[in-house]
Image (cartoon, coloured by chain):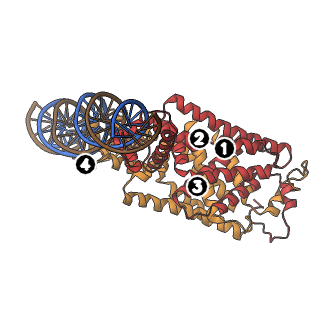
Chain colours: A orange, B red, C blue, D brown
Amino acid sequence: MPVATEHYREQRQQAIRCAAAVFAEKGFHGASTRDIAERLGIKQGSLYYYFKSKEEALGEVCLYGIADYVERMKSIAASDQPFEAKLLATVTSHLTAYRERNEALKVHNDERLYLPAEKRSNLKRLGSNYRQMLEAIFEEGVRDGALRNSIDCHFAAQAVIGICNAWGDLIVRDPDIDLADVIHKCTDLLLNGFRERRAAQRKQETGKKERTTWQNR
Amino acid sequence: MPVATEHYREQRQQAIRCAAAVFAEKGFHGASTRDIAERLGIKQGSLYYYFKSKEEALGEVCLYGIADYVERMKSIAASDQPFEAKLLATVTSHLTAYRERNEALKVHNDERLYLPAEKRSNLKRLGSNYRQMLEAIFEEGVRDGALRNSIDCHFAAQAVIGICNAWGDLIVRDPDIDLADVIHKCTDLLLNGFRERRAAQRKQETGKKERTTWQNR
DNA sequence: TCAGGATTCTATAGATCTATAGAAAAAACG
DNA sequence: CGTTTTTTCTATAGATCTATAGAATCCTGA
């Protein structure tokens, strides 16, 4: 029987990280409890000292993956930065998380649907919070005139998450990718894609070459 | 022993579609050959009349998922439409494919890494082709002045694929989403995010309200 | 109708894998 | 050092699951 001591919690945390790595590599069903135990340096049966089931391990990994995610988003949303800074902060936070706790985040995204309904809906709630806060940031951006008021904030929030997850996946797989560069380019794309054009125009230095290929259609 | 008759190929194709549906729902390792057979209306053992292994079934599903993908992209790239039309066509093709053969495409994206190295690299080659063609379209867009020449075409191509896949996933899960709407908004985002701003400006009707919140930073 | 080929079935070998129970070892503590 | 508590181990029950072999059924064309 496990006991809730300090040392126990630390060991368990270690086990969660191992499970994250294994689930990320092989998927939930493809990974065996033996795989996890081996990586942790114990025998298969001993793993059940820390988790009462493989499924519980998955739950912990998923939670660990997005644990402080929503928290960080909250503090970004609450800050009084202008829209653009908030967007940059969001993208930075999202992508940096992929570098730091890459496996757990990947597991959350790819394997959470194998959790029992209740745990899954808990995670879903967290995800929805995240998206809604992002949506609110966009709505604020529209009100402030930084963004065209024709944009669909729900779509925009999903798009941000989509791009970040897509690049996050690439970042997990290829550690040579320049994180700062990706952050910069993602933010740029999103900013240019959504912002009020006349404002954008003014900020831009003018005087580029100009062609007409696509215009006359 | 299977025989390569016309009827056989049709039946096998049907089996591939069933496998796609099951793999999409449960994942490769989470799905059993019994699941697939049941959906097809035959017994577990009979499935091996069509596939020599579960892995082969996965390979066929993945291939089916992106089969004509590259082909369609080829014809888009070869056409003499302007950049914007090509981008629209790409996004349309990509997202429409998710509606049509949703499961197989999802399986390709999520489960292909469980294939043996050789098959996996075949698929990877197809994927790279796709990305490279998209990249070339962007390069052309830069040359023609439709896009800022500061943009990173590799990044841009990945971003298109990333957004389309992210929304594709949502589309698969929620059939109520308005496909045309998503296509329109994705294209818009990408177009605005990358295009030459002075050109964009000209195309845009002017005279929107204008604020300054984010500018003075 | 019947012969032969095509398709599916039943049954099972053999290899997993999860989870549990109880013994053993290690650590903590007086 | 001896006792208690925490942690790990061994061994295994029981439930899968994949793949194969050979029998049974269905279909087609002479």
Point 85% across, 67% down: residue: B206
Is there a contact, CB below 8 Å, between mark 3 and mark 4?
no
Q: How many marks?
A: 4
- Closest to the camera, between mark 3 and mark 2, is 3
Is there a contact, CB below 8 Å, between mark 2 and mark 1?
yes
Q: Residue A106 in the image: x percent, y percent?
A: 50, 45
| Real-space Cα separation, disc 2 to disc 1, in angstroms | 9 Å
Q: Residue A13 in the image: x percent, y percent?
A: 38, 44
Q: Residue B27 in the image: x percent, y percent?
A: 44, 45
Is there a contact, CB below 8 Å, between mark 4 and mark 2?
no
Point 41% across, 57% down: residue: A120
Q: Is residue B135 left or right of residue A176?
A: right
Point 51% across, 45% down: residue: B107
Q: Which label was assigned to residue A3?
A: 4
Quadrant in which residue B69 is drawn: top right
Q: Amino acid at mark 1?
A: Gln
Q: Secondary structure at mark 2?
A: helix
| Real-space Cα separation, disc 4 to disc 2, in angstroms | 40 Å
| Real-space Cα separation, disc 3 to disc 1, in angstroms | 21 Å
Q: Amino acid at mark 3?
A: Arg
Identify the residue position indicated by label 2 in the image. Answer: A170
Q: Amino acid at mark 4?
A: Val
Q: Which label was assigned to residue B99?
A: 3
